[in-house]
Image: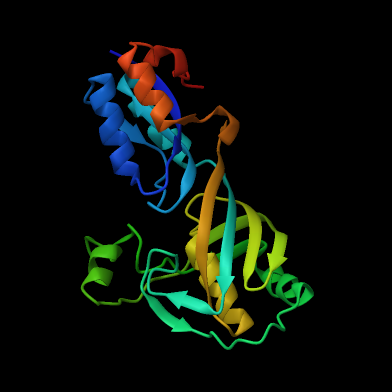
Amino acid sequence: MIDGIIVVDKPAGWTSFDVVAKIRNLAKTKKVGHSGTLDPMATGVLPIFLGKATKSIQDYLNGDKGYEGEMVLGITTDTGDAEGKIQTSNVQLPNNYQLKQIEEKIKKYRGEIEQVPPMYSAVKINGERLYKLARKGIEVKREPRKITIYSLLITHYSFPRVAFTVTCSKGTYIRQLVVDIGEDLGCGAHLSKLVRTYAHPFKLSQAVRMDTIISLAKEGKLDTIIQPIL
């Protein structure tokens, strides 16, 4: 029986549940869980808890998160990210969105703000997951939630792509943040890339790729990458 945490660098295309299921199989243990879902498109830090460590998941869920992302201006999707169906595409959008204009718009998102969860999310309303309703074409009213954006910085801009970093509290939807910024700019936007670089207290530099984890499991060396409960 393995007890502890494996900090996974989640690959693109995998759901968080896919990672849990794979490690459950590799570790040959039933007690496996994670702290903080990542969308399939996203990569980066996904702490996986095994054995007795699963009792501590809730303690880690409340931690702050850090991300590196990219938004594309002028194109909106039904999910708010690159995996969704395109809703609007301003292909004739003039290249006049200056960096200072974008930086001015994002100022309002720093600090404690209220954010309405996206329809494509695991939030429950009346006992049903929002994403299940969204897949049926049903949209319901969602109450805004208080979150904190500690840092939101643009790191590179080449129209229509805007690269950025975010440090935020738990429960922050980066997809929704991008959608809201796009609406404020008047052109719309969607999230095209997302890497979670930090999930308190773990950093991306500590994370292990899935192919490495699979290789170590075959060699009977999974214990070499187990982190203890802090």
Quarter of the N terminus within the rendering: top left
Left or right, 108 with respect to 212, comes to right
- Please give left or right for residue 159 compared with residue 135 in the image: right
Location of residue 107 with respect to 138 vertically, above or below:
above
Residue 130 in the image, given as x and y percentages of width and height: 29, 65
Q: Residue 139: give x, y in percent of width and height.
A: 30, 77
Q: Nearer the viewer, residue 102 or 192?
A: 192
Q: Nearer the viewer, residue 213 or 130?
A: 213
| Residue drawn 44% across the image and 69% down it | 80
92 lies above or below 61: below
Residue at 76% x, 72% y: name it: 99
Q: Quadrant of residue 21?
A: top left
Residue 35 in sight in this render: yes
Residue 108 position by quadrant: bottom right
Side of 182 where 35 appears, left or right: left
Residue 112 place in picture, x, y as percent: 62, 61
Give percent across and percent down for residue 183: 56, 80
Residue 31 visible to the viewer:
no
